[in-house]
Image: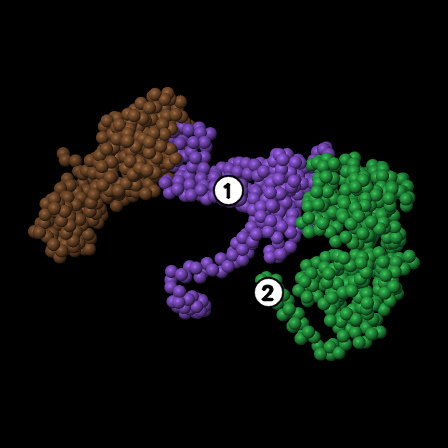
């Protein structure tokens, strides 16, 4: 073990780090190892985030931060300028509010659907059943697919001459414009989004279910507990920490939805499926005049919402850890 | 209180048969202990009695009624699990009430039963706590409390003391015995610890490999083990075993050593190979005759001493002497039998060879 | 700081390039052209430039064939950092007009240029300049309809004549689609640029004096027509409804599959259709449908420009003179199948290398359409900020079609969108 090529390589790698450790001391070494990743993070995530604040308080169309005139909260005022916040037509930035409204409805339906479907699937997959391993893999597989692939698959299924309409027509119906009708398109963005992500949350809930000791269920059986009561009084309370984590993660991700939906419907028809991230993208990059200030301000508002959700998620995980420790 | 009968219970896991046709009766109010090494099937048997598992053959009868097809809750049983299985997110009171609520019992009745059980087990001050806030012993009592409130026909215990430390175990053994006397309940108790069996049981059932080796009262098993396995399992320190050959009369010979007289000698023919079993307290030291050996270790407990001896032929013996001893390592001694001795045949199952009945 | 770093980096790279050139090449003056091709334009240009070099041995022209993406993304950076090539073929005409080289004083015959390229010279001028000559269009495009005549024949309905209006085309194509079962009577590319041609035919002016003014009666008429067509099925939601925002959506696939009766797109589709349709059915370009004001489409195309930073402005002008001369340009267009921006050639007609009857018919129609383009269309195409107007037009119109707002609301929003965009761009 002390000789051979592997040992030589590891010794070669060791000596600069040992030299570094002699220079800096063992207590500072963790920073050395963290530094490369921190550098990447700093340049590509943290710095742009901070720069974004500057963009949000400046106007004009120049890309270079130095060329942009300071306008204070004008961008935010512009975004929030509405006589009646619930009637999109009265807002100055009607497309922003339409996107916010679409996103809000999308988040509600998608998250509820996602959590319920993931829970039911996890409960089923937790039982002893034949082919259990296979089914677990099958449900998780869509999570591995790139969002573009997911959207293309469903686009081919749902388009007027796609597979689903072929089935409808074969059964004597007329073609349904699944992606061209505003309501249908909205529903399908929810369905596709759930399909693509549920495997991940099913896995989390499955892990939570398996952490529940099986002798609790046996004790419940000895107590003569009906199945429904077992679910509500034993399974759900013990699964609640995982459910909270799943809920908040799903919320955060739902607010950020863009990839699949952009490829599936492009935000159409009209703006029926245009959600907030796409609005920001269009305002900042797709229009000829890159109204970066407005887009940056909108992204900061979204960021604020996500921050609140993230704090909720941290609280939920802390709660989960505490109740794990107590058991 | 109910009685239990098992008739020809068989259990198989795939091609593997783990319970081989067990017959057993547990009388009303009896405290029966299933004991045996790991894998002997005692827990499996208990689960089949409880209804958590179904036998592949045979009948389970409670109060004469066949309950094979009945669900666990409908058999009138209650069980204390090895890990207590308390619902961690509920308070102690809620844990105790849970099963009773399933029966749609009136709240007043539930409260009364919880109050009685809590008083009896001294957990009244713990009712508002959650299981995570209790010590091991307290959790143990809550688990027992949960069964007591159910007022079942038979109490089932699945190795309930194995998660406690030694001191607590001793204390709980006493409490469980007291509980049994107080409730006059039928209790079936599973353990791998023969001490618990000996101290608490009205009757012990020794299991090995899915078969009942012997069932009887603790002293019966101690004094008249049916085979070598039971003899070696019951009693601590373990019985000493020596390979020997019978001689005429009541003697056996161990290798080339002088013959030993076996009191109440058994029915054997001359020259039959047997296993001689003698408990440590039935061995003594003599000046002449007896088996020669050397002392290895002496353990002085104060009230008694254990002397570990290696015989001339290499066999090791444990000898228990009351009080203190002057022997020490290296001393040459001679061993003889002072008290009961057992002979076990070398045949399948190694049954005890019955002593010759005096005319 | 990033700007400085970028400049230094590019300067470093550019400084190394001459060191990599073989010594012998340094004898003649070098002119570099950054060129992209949709089809065979690069080959044809190379061929023509070889003749130039033969006639001008003291000038060597290097044609760098690059992908279009590089023209769109990398070239602007080279230009802003002062590292531009001598010349380039560009499509974003107004984008960096300030960097173009005025070859007006350098060309042999200024009057020739001003006469033959009159309509398109303004497109290349930076803001405020009204007299400079900054390059020429390497062919011009026009938007126009392409018809699937086979469907008309199957339906037994005659093709509308050259002066037919949009409304007449609407009725005719709907009847054809009904009789033949074709899915889409009229398809228009989802693009503000595309809609503008018909809008101008309906009387849209796009400008109020010097200022952009998107919504007027002409525009309202055309947008209402498109809106009504979507409701009665003359236009299918499949095209405009399948994307959102400002995304482009063409209907080439649908047309090539024979599902569209009339496809309003442009001349650049001809070579593609020659390949994908061949003679699968009878297709060709037709005259632009008429409105009360004009029978117009929108022009477009790529231009060959020179850059101020060039070290050899005189040689740039000589190459330009060569390429702009009538015989050279005529041959270039004949081989690349582009329309002529050169007025003289356009009036004589280009003798295209078009092999198939579909191509010949289409190019003939295209040339006629080119001559009928409205001056409003030319002005709009040359306007620096036209994309603001195109985006506002298409986004809001599509929202009205999708039922998110009424047409009146859409028009009001178009006006406010344009105002917002102009304000953000710093335009009065």
At a point 60% along the width and 57% down the height, the residue shown is A66
User: In the shown orientation, is residue B202 left or right of residue B10?
Assistant: left
Marking on residue C391: none
Q: Position of residue A154 (x, y in %)?
A: 65, 43
In the displayed structure, B116 sits above or below B37; it is above
Q: Colour of chain A?
A: purple
In the displayed structure, B146 sits above or below A4; it is above
Whether residue B49 is visible:
no
Q: Residue furthest left?
A: B287
Q: Position of residue B296 (x, y in %)?
A: 16, 55
Whether residue A20 is visible:
yes
Name the image quarter holding residue A47: bottom right
10 Å crowding of disc 2: few (<14), some (14-19), many (20+) = few
At a point 66% along the width and 43% down the height, the residue shown is A267
Between B26 and B22, the one nearer to me in the picture: B26
Q: Which residue is mark 2?
A: C5
Between A115 and B153, the one nearer to me in the picture: A115
Name the image quarter holding residue A23: bottom left
Between A235 and B26, the one nearer to me in the picture: A235
Q: Position of residue C400 (x, y in %)?
A: 72, 38
Q: Which residue is mark 1?
A: A309
10 Å crowding of disc 1: few (<14), some (14-19), many (20+) = some
User: In the shown orientation, is residue B194 left or right of residue A168?
Assistant: left
Q: Position of residue A209 (x, y in %)?
A: 45, 39
Q: Colour of chain B?
A: brown
- C-alpha distance separating marks 2 and 1: 39 Å
At a point 38% along the width and 62% down the height, the residue shown is A26
Chain letter of disc 2 in the image: C
Name the image quarter holding residue B110: top left
Q: Colour of chain C?
A: green
Check the picture and name the quadrant holding the N terminus of chain B: top left
At a point 75% along the width and 50% down the height, the residue shown is C386
């Amino acid at each position: 073990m002390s000789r051979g090529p592997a040992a030589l390589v590891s010794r070669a790698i060791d000596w600069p780090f040992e030299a570094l450790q002699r220079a800096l001391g063992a207590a500072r070494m963790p920073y050395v190892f963290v530094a490369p990743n921190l550098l990447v993070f700093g340049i590509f995530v943290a710095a742009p985030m901070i720069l974004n604040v500057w963009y949000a308080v400046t106007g004009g169309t120049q890309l270079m931060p130095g060329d942009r005139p300071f306008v204070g909260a004008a961008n935010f005022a512009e975004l929030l300028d509405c006589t009646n916040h619930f009637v999109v037509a009265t807002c100055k930035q009607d497309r922003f509010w339409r996107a916010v409204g679409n996103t809000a409805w999308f988040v509600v339906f998608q998250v509820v659907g996602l959590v319920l479907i993931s829970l039911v699937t996890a409960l089923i997959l937790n039982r002893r059943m034949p082919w259990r391993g296979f089914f677990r893999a099958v449900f998780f597989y869509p999570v591995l697919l790139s969002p573009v692939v997911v959207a293309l698959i469903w686009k081919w299924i749902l388009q007027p001459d796609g597979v689903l309409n072929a089935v409808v027509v074969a059964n004597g119906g007329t073609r349904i414009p699944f992606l061209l009708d505003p309501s249908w398109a909205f529903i399908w963005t929810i369905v596709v989004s759930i399909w693509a992500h549920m495997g991940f949350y099913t896995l989390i809930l499955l892990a939570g279910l398996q952490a529940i000791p099986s002798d609790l269920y046996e004790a419940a059986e000895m107590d003569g507990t009906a199945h429904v009561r077992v679910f509500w009084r034993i399974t759900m309370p013990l699964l609640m920490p995982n459910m909270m984590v799943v809920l908040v993660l799903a919320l955060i991700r739902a607010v950020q939805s863009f990839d699949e939906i952009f490829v599936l419907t492009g935000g159409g028809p009209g703006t029926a499926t245009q959600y907030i991230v796409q609005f920001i993208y269009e305002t900042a990059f797709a229009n000829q005049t890159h109204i970066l200030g407005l887009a940056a301000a909108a992204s900061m508002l979204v960021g604020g919402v996500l921050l609140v959700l993230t704090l909720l998620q941290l609280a939920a995980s802390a709660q989960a850890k505490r109740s794990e420790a107590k058991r | 209180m109910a009685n239990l009968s098992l008739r020809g219970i068989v259990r198989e896991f795939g091609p593997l048969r783990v319970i081989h046709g067990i017959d057993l009766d547990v009388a009303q109010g009896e405290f029966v202990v299933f004991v045996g090494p790991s894998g002997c099937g005692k827990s499996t048997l208990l689960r089949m009695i409880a209804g958590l598992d179904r036998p592949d053959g045979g009948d389970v009868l409670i109060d004469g009624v066949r309950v094979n097809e009945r669900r666990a809750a409908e058999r009138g049983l209650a069980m204390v699990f090895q890990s207590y299985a308390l619902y961690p997110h509920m308070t102690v009171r809620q844990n105790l009430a849970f099963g009773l609520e399933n029966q749609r019992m009136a709240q007043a009745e539930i409260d009364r039963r919880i109050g009685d059980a809590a008083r009896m087990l001294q957990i009244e001050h713990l009712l508002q706590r959650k299981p995570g806030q209790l010590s091991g012993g307290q959790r143990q009592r809550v688990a027992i409390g949960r069964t007591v409130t159910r007022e079942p026909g038979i109490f089932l215990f699945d190795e309930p003391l194995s998660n406690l430390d030694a001191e607590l175990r001793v204390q709980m053994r006493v409490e469980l015995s007291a509980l049994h006397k107080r409730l006059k309940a039928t209790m079936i108790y599973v353990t791998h610890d023969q001490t618990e069996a000996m101290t608490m049981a009205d009757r012990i059932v020794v299991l090995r490999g899915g078969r009942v080796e012997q069932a009887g009262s603790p002293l019966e098993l101690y004094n008249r083990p049916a085979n070598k396995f039971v003899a070696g399992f019951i009693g601590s320190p373990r019985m000493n075993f020596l390979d020997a050959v019978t001689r005429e009369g009541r003697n056996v010979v161990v290798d080339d050593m002088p013959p030993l007289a076996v009191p109440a000698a058994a029915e054997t023919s001359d020259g039959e190979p047997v296993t001689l079993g003698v408990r440590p307290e039935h061995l003594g030291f003599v000046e002449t005759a007896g088996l020669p050996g050397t002392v290895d270790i002496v353990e002085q407990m104060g009230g008694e001493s254990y002397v570990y001896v290696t015989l001339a032929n290499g066999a090791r013996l444990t000898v228990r002497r009351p009080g203190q001893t002057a022997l020490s390592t290296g001393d040459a001694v001679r061993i003889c039998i002072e008290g009961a001795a057992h002979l076990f045949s070398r045949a399948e199952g190694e049954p005890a060879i019955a002593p010759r009945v005096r005319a | 700081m990033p700007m400085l770093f970028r400049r230094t980096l590019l300067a470093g790279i550019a400084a190394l390039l001459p060191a990599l050139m073989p010594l012998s090449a340094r004898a003649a003056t070098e002119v570099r052209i950054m060129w992209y091709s949709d089809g065979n334009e690069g080959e044809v240009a190379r061929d023509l430039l070889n003749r130039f070099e033969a006639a001008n041995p003291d000038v060597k022209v290097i044609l760098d064939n690059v992908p279009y993406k590089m023209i769109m993304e990398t070239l602007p950076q080279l230009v802003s950092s002062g590292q531009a090539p001598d010349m380039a073929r560009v499509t974003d005409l107004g984008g960096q007009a300030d960097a173009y080289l005025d070859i007006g004083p350098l060309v042999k015959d200024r009057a020739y240029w001003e006469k033959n390229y009159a309509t398109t010279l303004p497109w290349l001028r930076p803001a405020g300049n009204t007299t400079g000559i900054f390059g020429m269009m390497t062919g011009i495009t026009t938007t126009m309809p392409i018809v699937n005549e086979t469907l008309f024949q199957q339906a037994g309905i005659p093709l509308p004549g050259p002066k037919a209006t949009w409304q007449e085309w609407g009725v005719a194509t709907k009847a054809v689609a009904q009789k033949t079962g074709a899915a889409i009577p009229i398809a228009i590319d989802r693009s503000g640029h595309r809609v503008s041609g018909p809008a101008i035919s309906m009387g849209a002016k796009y400008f109020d004096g010097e200022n952009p003014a998107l919504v007027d009666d002409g525009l309202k008429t055309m947008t209402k027509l498109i809106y009504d067509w979507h409701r009665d099925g003359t236009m299918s939601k499949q095209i405009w409804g399948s994307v959102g925002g400002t995304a482009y959506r063409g209907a080439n696939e649908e047309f090539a599959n024979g599902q569209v009766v009339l496809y309003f797109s442009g001349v650049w589709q001809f070579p593609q259709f020659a390949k994908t349709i061949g003679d699968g059915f009878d297709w060709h370009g037709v005259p632009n449908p008429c409105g009360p004001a004009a029978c117009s489409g929108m022009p477009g195309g790529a231009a060959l420009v020179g850059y101020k930073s060039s070290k050899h402005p005189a040689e740039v002008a000589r190459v330009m003179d060569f390429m702009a001369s009538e015989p050279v340009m005529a041959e270039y267009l004949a081989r690349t199948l582009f329309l002529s921006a050169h007025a003289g050639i356009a009036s004589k007609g280009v003798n295209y290398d078009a092999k198939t009857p579909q191509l010949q018919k289409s190019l003939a129609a295209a040339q006629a359409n080119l001559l009928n383009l409205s001056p409003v269309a030319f002005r709009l195409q040359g306007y620096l900020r036209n994309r603001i107007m195109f985006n506002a037009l298409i986004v809001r119109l599509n929202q009205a079609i999708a039922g998110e707002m009424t047409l009146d609301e859409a028009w009001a929003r178009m006006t406010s969108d344009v105002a917002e965009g102009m304000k953000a761009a710093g335009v009065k």
